[in-house]
Amino acid sequence: MNIEIITLAEVQDIKGEAGNFSVDVLKHPRYIDEDKCIACGVCAEKCPKKIIDTYNAGLSKRKSAYVEYPQAVPLKYVIDPETCIYLQKGKCGACKKKCPVDAVNFDQKPENKTINVGSVILAPGFETFSPEAFENYQYAKHPNVITSLEFERILSASGPTQGHVSRPSDHKDPKKIAWFQCVGSRDMNRCDNAYCSSVCCMYAIKEAVIAKEHVGDELDCAIFFMDMRTHGKEFERFYDSAKTKSGVRFIRSRVHTITPVTGSDDLELRFVTEDGDLKTEIFDMVVLSVGMQTPKALVDLSKKLDIDLTPGNFADTQTFSPVATSRPGIFVSGAFQGPKDIPQAVVDSSAASAAAAELLADVRNTCTKEKKIVPEVSVLGDRPKIGVIICQCGTNIAGVVDVPKVVEYASTLPYVELATDKLFACSQDAQDNMVELIKEKGLNRIVMAACTPKTHEPLFQDTLTAAGLNKYLFEMTNIRNQNSWVHKNNPEMATEKAKDLVRMAVSKVAMQEPLAEVELPVNQTAMVVGGGISGMAAAKSFAEQGYETHLVEKGSRLGGQAVNLYMTAKGEYIQEKLAEMIASVESDDRIHVHLDTQLSNVDGFVGNFESTFSSNGNETKLEHGVAVLATGATPYHPTEYGYGTDDRIITSLDLDKKLMDDDPSLKTLNGAAFIQCVGSREPERMYCSRICCTHSIENSIQLKEKNPDMNVYILYRDIRAYGEKELLYKKARQLGVIFIRYSIDNKPVVNTDSGKLTVNVLDHILNMPLELEVDMVSLATAIIPNKDEKLSNFFKVATNTDGFFIEKHAKLGPSEFSTDGVYLCGLAHYPKPIDESIAQAKAAVARAVTLLARKTIFSSGTVAQVDPVLCAACGVCMSICPYSAPKFTEEGRFAGKAEINPALCKGCGLCVASCRSGAIHLKGFDTDQILTQIFEMDEAV
Amino acid sequence: MSTKEPKIISFLCNWCSYGAADLAGVSRMEYPSNIRVIRIPCTGRMSVKFVLAALRQGADAVWVSG
């Protein structure tokens, strides 16, 4: 209601300044009236023009009238003016003739709009690199060399092969598939993309594993790579299981040329193995793992908008303001900020909305629209009087299902007062008519047999509300998407099915009661736990948006781990920025800092928490609406590589300290070795600590700059300098830092026996043992979360096997917990650099503010309820509920029995199914309502 | 081979499989009509009771998806 979607629009220019922009938008014609289109698809069906389906990566055909993909929002058809016969030649118009709602309008013209806004978020995305120019890979010539995006479509159930893996040339089931990594990434020779695209390693592994799932274990999948970069949360474990369980082969080699095998559609690859042997292998198909890049048009637009770009053509941002572009008031999220995966893009988008909201805090809710409230008529205890409305959906339903027959049948069903049909039940006049019918006939239950409740239930429920009827006295049954559309060649059976579905819905709705939505106030105060960079960034964002915030830190100072850090990957001095940040938090009247304070208890739930702070034996209580957990992590204390036995063996943080102190001894070193993955990517800690490669590379550059003659070695397993951090890796190599790869089975050995400090390692190129004489060894140690079981229990939030908090959804809910009103950010979620920590802190706040801004929340009506008389107080519901909604009643007649907090209940029904006493009812989906549908399954005819 | 058409009752999770069944429609895929779908809020709602009731009601197969 408060989001206006303007599709087919291009931003031409942004004038003005932060707080007052005017945005020039060119809206291209859709040639279909969005308000009229009901997405029935008749236009596409009748359109005679077949063209290549770009969404399916050119692997299938579509029509000129089309919807790009089934999940498109808004789900409205569009006519492609480049290929439409009418728009090109003035003849045809088949779609216009056949459209049942007269939505096709060839007279639409491009429109110029100007929008006045206070802040702007850029989320224009990326394009994949086109490998056509790489002649040696045969992409342009050979059908069996495809891009990863094309393979993604082949794997998809909604793709051109419906998920069946077959190769394009002859539709043969492949036996061997190869993936080539870094096509269009980390490459300055054949393209200009020096950066790492960050996502390709992980998607290639995923594609290989899924391909094996689809085809079977006999499929041989081989991934050719340089460094395997699985630095995301749970990614290392996935990589390991792909190797050990799924049997995907990982070959560290860059294949130079693909040669088609004469007389067949197969492909021959020649490559050099790690041992230096030249090998030849034949594959059925090759997938090129193409990278991400900023489209040329976007680069041009950025110049026009005065947005600075990085060397890799991404929007330039700073570490401490990771979603702000160079132009104040314009923010950025997603792959235009840098190549990234979905969770990171989701974090960014929430962060950008927080940044935009900070700017507009004073004018919050000044442009919002609100719904009108109609008083509700009580129908409690009345005999059901059901109205059944069958939608024809033009010919979509009526063209297959015999609608009059279904109407006639429906009118014979018990409690049915009225059965009627509508040409389009969702049209405004049909809605108005529905309101009249409800009032005139005194209907107190409605069944709508139409399209899908997933898209239309809220619309029809609004109509009930407008008629003064409780919106839960409604049941929708799906006779289009799940009937007429999928049984179009079997109209008789489809009609029978429609009758069955209507009868099932009628029997269910007859048992429906009006349901109440409980209104709860939301306390407008926020609490943030943890005073590190993430916690401070969160507190600051809350305060900027006008909310009182309490920042709780168990230590005696703010700053967390950042006080130990020297420089960011972008070259900013961390201590300077940190001091500014601490000062701004401490001087903000809306932020109350509680040092030396821990939580000793938390009561309540979303919107209404009460936490007890414990500080030096004193206890105080705070009521707050939301909580952000930013409890951070600590460095691993190594026992390996002789740490602690010799002052010359130090950790990365020790080296940062020396750099901060400008320790003169650093200049005099003749040699220094960095050892990576100390404590990370080990069986007991199967995760990558994400930041250590960049950290060591940065420090190696510092040493080289202090003393160019110093021998600097980095001993690594895979260099994971993702995104534009790759440029630092390149710089280090140019400065003469020597990178030596070791394997986990053959780790380097640090020796101090002779008084000299030496590191023995097997050189991966020469395959010869090396002895490096150095004056310093810097260990890149793992990041270990601060595990606090008490805190987890207080908020009922879980941690994974590594001790990091488990977010609500790995991809779509990275900054919030399953427990409502509780959010997370920073190292407690997963190791990450400062820019990503700050982005996640802002993201957590953005999610929390969606709650705070509402001031009151309504529970859903379809929630579980305990009948305390039947409850045996066994506690199963409490242990099984993922949202901590049930608890034991504390006082009164039913003390000790379970009760369910409707504000926390998501209505999943897990407790209902698990309750052995049958004491729990799920309103709207109660046991008898489901049973009655089963009983009424097929009695039509 | 029997020519009898089996009667299938399915319990589909509102958030995934029910949506997938909708998309099958949007994509105009075709499948036999002898299936009746009951939408449930989550497969967590699924109970053995429903499976037994469906079988007793004469269903030849029960499909729970979510």
Image: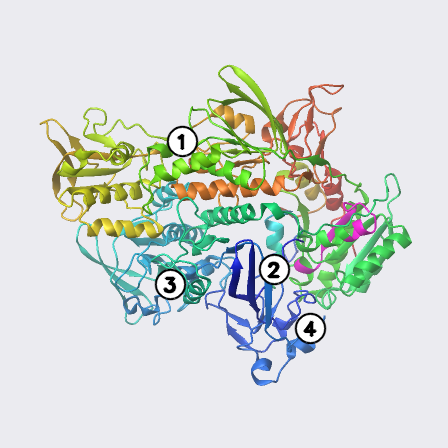
Residues rendered magenta in the picture: A463-481
Of badges 4 and 1, the one in the foreground is 1
Crowding near the residue tagged with mark 3, few <14, some 14–19, many ≥20 C-alpha atoms within 10 Å: some
- The answer for how far apart the CA atoms under marks 1 and 2 are is 41 Å
Residue A845 point in image, percent of width and height: 54, 40
Q: Quadrant of the N terminus of chain A?
A: bottom right
Of badges 1 and 3, the one in the foreground is 1
Disc 1 marks which residue? A560
- The answer for how far apart the CA atoms under marks 2 and 4 are is 24 Å
Earlier-in-chain disc, 1 versus 2: 2
Circle on res. A99: 4
Earlier-in-chain disc, 3 versus 2: 2
Q: Chain of mark 2?
A: A
Disc 2 marks which residue? A5
Please tell me in which quadrant of the rendered image residue A833 appears. top left
Earlier-in-chain disc, 1 versus 3: 3
Q: In the rendered image, is residue B64 in sight?
A: no
Please give the name of the residue rendered at 90% of the width and 54% of the height, measured from the top-left corner: A440
- The answer for how far apart the CA atoms under marks 4 and 1 are is 63 Å
Disc 3 marks which residue? A129
